[in-house]
Amino acid sequence: MASAAAGEVAIIGSGLIGQSWAMLFASGGFKVKLYDIGQQQVTNALEKIRKEMKFLEQSGSLKGSLGAEEQLSLISGCLNIQEAVEGAMHIQECVPENLELKKKIFAQLDQIVDDKVVLSSSTSCLLPSKVFAGLAHVKQCIVAHPVNPPYYVPLVELVPHPKTAPATVDRTYALMQKIGQSPVRVMKEIDGFALNRLQYAVISEAWRLVEEGIVSPSDLDLVVSDGLGMRYAFIGPLETMHLNAEGMLSYCDRYSEGMQHVLKTFGPIPDFSGATVEKVNQAMCVKVPNDPEHLAARRQWRDECLLRLAKLKRQMQPQ
Ligand code: NAI
């Protein structure tokens, strides 16, 4: 069976991100043990995964070469951490974003794992030097930070602890590629890694433009969704520079002065409170009322858009 060939993976924490990782690893033919602290959490997670995989199969968007039933048969729930990690070549931690909790989990894993398994955390913003501090198996530890929703957005940031072995990074990189994700190497840990640093830079300037009354909140979002974002789904900001002139050198030659002039006018870090938050909130609630039903419906629509975009990106392989 495909499971035996691909290997075994343990997921610690069966919430939103744990479920996505389970589906991704199963799509690559890996046998997955999904561990959580309560039977109810595990049962809910397995039910949600079943529903999602059936939907994906029906809509022609299931990843991997196996059918939904075959992939589902690779995933099992587990309430014993030792059993969950036994035989695993990769452990993906997905418990809530709390440093003390994550440290406790990795200290527990440190006691029971061998010298071969990779210990990986899904943390969005905790630094590897904090999460993996003092572990005997630190060479095998890495952050593999996915982007929500990971099944449709393939980027995974790989961030090492200063003592992580290069082989751990290489193995995790290859594993991410094998399950169809798009890994990037963040060479050294830094607050926000790469994605959130870029995201916060954009949010910060968006906020200032609205605060200063330069554009309305809904027009600000359009600048990205109907402007920058159209390109950025296919090429990043650096390649955009390269293509928007006769190559990068020509772009810098033509536009560096103008860019620096604009960059010098950027304001201070916003405090995200007061009248501006009222204004932005009001505009967002006109677009999407902030009750659970409307938010859930809009998220579902967003995920459908991302699913179709992912399909388009597969069709539009670079020349
Ligand atoms: P979640 O709250 O949906 O799931 C957490 C799961 O961990 C729950 O099922 C909970 O029962 C379980 N859990 C709690 N204590 C545990 C323990 N001691 N042992 C085992 N399981 C335990 O959280 P979510 O959103 O899945 O986030 C998980 C991690 O992924 C966090 O570090 C988060 O920062 C990161 N992440 C989240 C993203 C998001 O958009 N939700 C995106 C990228 C990363």
Image (tube, rainbow, N blue to C red):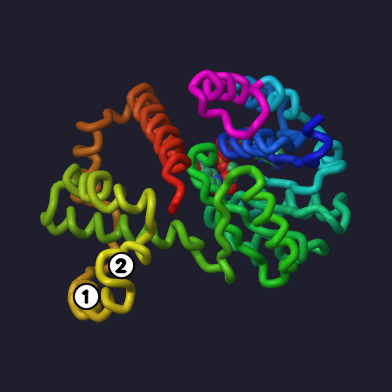
> Ligand 1 is found in which quarter of the picture?
top right
Counting from the top left corner in percent of width and height, residue 239 is at 37, 64
Total numbered labels: 2
Instruction: Tell me if label 1 and label 2 are in contact, CB under 8 Å.
Output: yes
Above or below, 245 against 210 in this view is below
Circle 1: residue type: Tyr
Q: Any mark on residue 255, and which?
A: 1
Counting from the top left corner in percent of width and height, residue 166 is at 72, 68
Counting from the top left corner in percent of width and height, residue 99 is at 62, 54
Residue at position x 25%, y 55% in the image:
206
Q: What is the residue that sits farthest to the left in this orientation? A: 213
Q: Is residue 62 left or right of residue 244?
A: right
Q: Any mark on residue 241, and which?
A: 2
Q: Is residue 225 magenta?
A: no
Question: Label 1 to label 2, Cα distance in Å?
Answer: 9 Å
Where residue 5 sits, quadrant-wise, is top right
Above or below, 235 against 151 in this view is below
Mark 2 Cα shell of 10 Å, populated few (<14), some (14-19), many (≥20):
some
Residue at position x 69%, y 50% in the image:
175
Extent of the magenta region:
49-68
Mark 1 Cα shell of 10 Å, populated few (<14), some (14-19), many (≥20):
few
Where disc 2 sits, the SS reads helix
Q: Is residue 61 left or right of residue 177?
A: left
Counting from the top left corner in percent of width and height, residue 150 is at 53, 41
Above or below, 133 against 260 in this view is above
Q: Quadrant of the N terminus?
A: top right
Judging depth in this view, the residue of 162 and 110 nearest the camera is 162
Circle 2: residue type: Met
